[in-house]
Image (cartoon, rainbow, N blue to C red):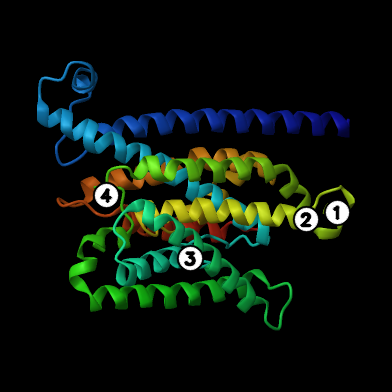
Amino acid sequence: MTSATSTCATRRGTTSAIVFFVVGIIVLTGLCVASLVIGSASIPLGELWQVVTDPTDPIAEATLLGLRVPRTILGVLVGAALGVSGALMQALTRNPLADPGILGVNAGAGFAVVLGVAFLGITRIDQYLPLAFLGALLAAVLVYVLAALGERPPSPLRMTLVGVATSAVLIGFSQTLALIDVETFDRMRFWGAGTLADRPGGTIETVAPWIIAGLALAVVSSRALNAVALGDDVARSFGARVGAVRITVALSITLLCGAATAAVGPIGFIGLMVPHLIRPFTGPDQRRIIAFSAIVAPVLLLGSDILGRVMVDSELQVGIVTALVGAPILALLARNTRAVNL
């Protein structure tokens, strides 16, 4: 009787997960279409196909193919990168409050790019990338080392506090450099707030291979992360190579956060919120969490970007909207002890 009840519960959980995944794909598809038609120059939904196949309005064609389509594709890529990197960080550190924004990884990548702009004169997205990767990696290592001083392994709360402090310092230095050289950093004002709009040509082609590589590493390491979540000794008893898993996951996080930050600037809360939102449907299985994060995080990012287009006349940057939306959602999640403890 107990076994039959457990089997039924497992089937219900699997069915709920499949339904949630399919609904997520449908919602993401709808938001992609909405992202193409909504903006300062609206394109009627009924004319969308005509603009693509038989354009008669050059302004609508330029708006759709030159601006909206790249913006939407970039939103899906960056959303998946931020959501999966957040899930990986929470699994790797066993810290439910871990997030690339909170633990200083995004701030480190952004600070390295700002240094490059200020002192090396770099201006292209392909020049941002190596600095963003290096900055993300060094910031993650710095936060872990500082948090581990006097407490090994560092507690989730200690890592969170050190990460928040490190982020504040790095962001402060970045803003100081931007204020000192206003003319150079004027074109980076929106990038510093986190934006999908008006990104330089070639951005998608430059960051997509790195994001795809980071997602592939995340999928490869997801099964081993389930064992690592049980503790290092238990993971080794199951045959998991704990050190190799950590290096692989750290490399994946670096690629995902570095590429996302180089492309659109630092965006917070996505990596923190998404794993908590989906765990009630996926449970603690990292394979499901990573797959669902790759779908739900772009939904959150694209939805925030569309909301920013209609909130004010001149558009609100998506990094600001995710903070406005993310803070109350995080507060609600924090009240749900079951979600936090998963």
Label 2 with label 1: CB-CB less than 8 Å: yes
Sequence-first tag of 4 and 1: 1
- Which residue in the protein does label 2 denote? 242
Mark toward the viewer: 3 or 2: 3
Give the crowd class for mark 2: few <14, some 14-19, many >=20 residues within 10 Å: some
Quarter the N terminus occupies = top right
324 relative position to 341: left or right? left
Label disc, if present, on residue 135 of the rendered structure: 3
- Which residue in the protein does label 4 denote? 308
C-alpha span from label 3 to label 1: 31 Å
Label 4 with label 1: CB-CB less than 8 Å: no
Task: Give the image location of residue 115, x and y in percent.
Answer: 37, 70
Rendering quarter of residue 181: bottom left
Q: Secondary structure at mark 4?
A: helix
Residue at 24 percent of width and 47 percent of height: 198
* Of the pair 115 and 70, the residue shown nearer to us: 115
Task: Give the image location of residue 243, x and y in percent.
Answer: 76, 58
Q: Residue furthest front?
A: 120
Q: Secondary structure at mark 2?
A: helix
Task: Give the image location of residue 46, x and y in percent.
Answer: 21, 20
